[in-house]
Amino acid sequence: MSRSRDSRISLAGSSPARLAAVALATVLLTALLLLTLAHLSGAAPTPTTPSTTTPTTTEPTPPTTPPPAPKPPLASTGYMLAATETTATLRGGVDPRGTETSYSFQYGIDTAYGSQTPSVAVGAGMQEVKVSQTLSLLAPATTYHYRLVAMSAAGTAFGPDRAFTTKKTPLTIAISAAPNPSLYGARFLVNGTVSGTGAANQWIVLQANPFPYLGGFSALSLPEMTDASGNFSSRSTASSRALSCARRRSTSPRCSAPS
């Protein structure tokens, strides 16, 4: 009891410098105690690092390439293969270029055409297809223009224009006499018709070869001209009934005996 009192008395009687030293020591001890407790509890403050957020970049989507547009077909008009008086076979080539394609031929007496063959399918290949069609009911000795046409969903192609001429119809002649039979020395009428290309406005000469048919043919009438339909008529006498043949005197004529 006396010792504690001595300590208090001693502290009370201490100088200000000594009191400051004691206060400092007390603060140091307290700080050391706090650090020791923090270490033992594992709760020592960890220095924080400012967070850095990496921005997310989105790659741009490449544009979608559209499929290539279908190509229109190709058409190549070929030369006429064969022609008669009323028919002709045309030919050509069609390249569908990958799209279902059909073709036909346009034709007429000029480049306006005006007529067309039925359409025919050639498929959807990638190579040229050889094609042909035959025309009929044509006029003899007539020039026609034609071209090949190819059609698909991608478009229509026209081949170049070409032309051909049908053949002439050979001229033929048919004759008849009236009355038949007729009296010797009496006059009778010879009728005839020239048929074929250019039958109109043809000069006709009747010839006779009298019995006994040894002297050959000689003129029986003056030249006559056929009408627009190729018809003609001529009067003669019955002395010429001994005809072996009556014929048209012209380029490569055909003759027939009077009926």
Image (cartoon, rainbow, N blue to C red):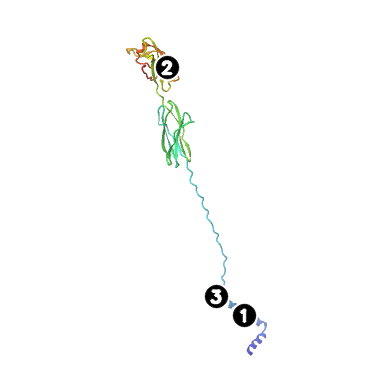
Quarter placement of the C terminus: top left
* Foreground label between 1 and 2: 2
Disc 1 residue crowd, few under 14, some 14–19, many 20+, Cα 10 Å: few
Above or below for 96 versus 247? below
The residue that mark 2 highlights is 232
Which residue is disc 1 drawn over? 26
Q: Pick whichever of labels 3 and 2 is earlier in the sequence.
A: 3
Quickly name the residue at label 3.
41
The Cα atoms of the two marked residues, 3 and 2, are separated by 145 Å
Instruction: Name the amino acid, label 3.
Output: Ser
Q: Earlier in the sequence, mark 1 or mark 2?
A: 1
Q: Residue at x 41, y 20 (%)?
A: 194
Q: Is residue 53 above or below residue 111?
A: below
Residue 193 is situated, as x and y percent measured from the top left of the image, at 41, 19
Q: In terms of depth relative to the viewer, which is nearer, 211 or 141?
A: 211
**Tag 2: Cα neighbours inside 10 Å, few (<14), some, or many (≥20)?**
many
**Numbered disc 3: secondary structure:** helix
Q: Quadrant of residue 29?
A: bottom right
Look at label 1 and name its amino acid: Thr
Instruction: Please give the name of the residue rendered at 62% of the width and 80% of the height, measured from the top-left corner.
Output: 26
